[in-house]
Amino acid sequence: MLIVGLLLQASVAAEDGFEVIRSAHDCVFEARAKSHPGGAALRATCHWVDVEPEAMGRLVTNYKDYTDWLWPLAECTVVETEPERTLVYQRQQIMTLADREVLLWMTQRQNGTNTRVDWSAANDKPLEVSPGAIRTPKNTGFWLIDAHPEGGSHVKHEVAVNAGGAAIPEFLLNWLRYKGFISIIKDVRKHARQKK
């Protein structure tokens, strides 16, 4: 029943260019093609009965600890804090690819069990990248967490990235898009369960 409900939500959402690619780990995973006006993106919509929304909210709002549960991140540092947003530096290491570095403007809103974290590349800020690394020109997305009416958490995560640099081989890109993204979501759930 859970997966059927999530699939119905996904079919309604398909109007924005996303198509269901897989259901796993109590989530529906969707992808949007690069040819879409909004560009390529990935999305997961989940109902996790074993994760409290408050625990999930604590996980995604603690930026400096993202390296604990987001495996591509080798470094995540808060650079600057403003009243409405936070500037965060991230360095990703994925297999044999050149490291990707980015500055992100991140915002968070919390209201009871509802948490939303949004981010986008802070291209207005200078970033001196490490030797051999590439600055990621596009990295946008969000985490949206709330209590699910049937218990646990309703979790929605969307991300759109242009990694920059030379074209990534198609086989690796497909692995990152599908298996890599699903693996990240699975790890997030595991860490959120431990945050009780």
Image: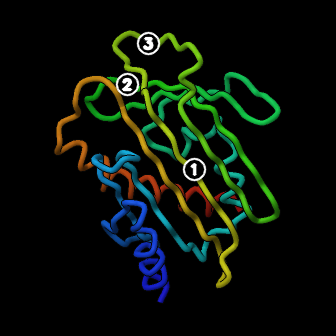
Residue type, label 1: Phe
Q: Amino acid at mark 3?
A: Ser
Report x, y in % for residue 159.
Answer: 47, 48
Residue annotated with mark 3: 130
Residue depicted at x 32% and y 69% = 22
At label 2, the amino acid type is: Asp
Q: Which residue is mark 2?
A: 99
Residue 69 placement, left or right of 58: left
Give whichever of discs 1 and 2 has the lower sequence position: 2
Q: CA distance from mark 1 to mark 2?
A: 22 Å
Which quadrant of the structure image shows residue 56? bottom right
Residue at mark 1? 142
Residue 66 position, x and y percent, is 58, 41
Name the spot of residue 167 as percent of width and height, x first: 22, 30
Decide which of 14, 111 is in the foreground and name it: 14
The reply to whether the C-beta atoms of the residues labelled 3 and 2 are less than 8 Å apart is: yes
